[in-house]
Each structure stands twice: as C-alpha cells, then as structure tokens.
Amino acid sequence: MEQQKLPNVTIALVLGIISFIACCCSMGIGGLVLSGIAFYLVTKDQKLYLENPELYGNYSQLKTARIIAIIGLALAAIAFLFSIYQIVSAGGWASYNEQQMEQLRELGFPME
C-alpha cells in the first residue's frame, strides 16, 4: 500500500518561511498571523497522522514545518514586542511617526 502525504505540510512550510520575512516588514504582525496559521495547519495534520500513522509518509516534513512555525512565532512575537516598546518609548504613535520621518529626511528621502 502506497503511503499518502499529509495535506497541509507544504503550505505550512511555505507560510512558516514567509513569516520570517513578514515579521521584519510588518512590525511582527504579519509574522504572527502567518506563523500562527502555519502552526494551526501543522497541529491539524499532526492529529490526522496520530489517528493513522501507517497511512502517511511525510511526517518528517511535518516536524520540520512545526519547528519553522514555532521559530516564526517566536521571532514575530519578539519583533512585535520590540515595536510596541519603540512606540511607547517614543511617546506614542505620533511621536514615533515623527521620529521615523526625521530619520528618512536625514537619509535624503524627500518628505512633504
């Protein structure tokens, strides 16, 4: 009997990898969302595998996807907490925005 592949492993791997990039580009929020979805899909497939382990052949990929999702969640949480810290230490969202605009002006980007 040929073993099947778990249905969500590939998408969980892709989401976990993309979450690394998203956590850097979206103050951690994108990474939290994508790695959270990846972790949910991995958990769903893990339950499916545990019901009938001899039916599925790509459990090692599932473990890899789980590790990547956990690392993505941790990195995104750190990025999100650091972003919150930066906003609070700047004195609020308006002050944070002004600091960012000033830094861009210093780098030579034209700001209106």
Image (cartoon, rainbow, N blue to C red):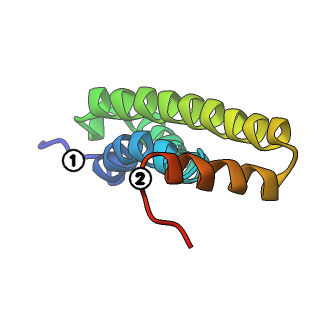
Secondary structure of residue under mark 2: loop
Residue 41 visible to the viewer: no
Task: Report if the CB atoms under discs 2 and 1 are less than 8 Å apart.
Answer: no
Q: Nearer the viewer, residue 98 or 9?
A: 98
| Mark carried by residue 38 | none
Residue lying furthest bottom? 112
Pick whichever of labels 2 and 1 is earlier in the sequence.
Answer: 1
Secondary element at image label 1: loop
Q: Where is residue 3 drawn, in percent x and y? A: 18, 41
Name the residue: 21% across, 47% down.
4
Left or right side of 94 for 6: left
Residue 61 position in % (x across, y down): 28, 32
* Picture layout, residue 93 above or below residue 86: below
Which quadrant: the C terminus?
A: bottom right
Q: Nearer the viewer, residue 73 or 39?
A: 73
Q: Up-down: is 85 above or below 67? A: below
Question: 49 and 26: which one is in front?
Answer: 26
Q: Is residue 102 left or right of residue 65?
A: right
Q: Is residue 68 something one can see in this rendering?
A: yes
The vertical placement of 88 against 101, above or below, is above
Residue positioned 74% across, 49% down in the render: 96
Residue pictured at 83% horizontal, 35% vertical: 89
Residue topped by disc 2: 108
| Residue 4, disc | 1
Residue 110 sits in quarter: bottom left
At label 1, which amino acid type do we have? Gln
In the rendered structure, the answer to whether residue 56 lies left or right of residue 26 reads left
Between the residue at mark 2 and the residue at mark 1, the CA separation in whole angstroms equals: 56 Å
**Residue 103 location, x and y as percent?**
56, 46
Screen quadrant of the N terminus: top left
Q: Position of residue 78 (x, y in %)?
A: 63, 30
Q: Which callout, 2 or 1, points to the residue nearer the camera?
A: 2
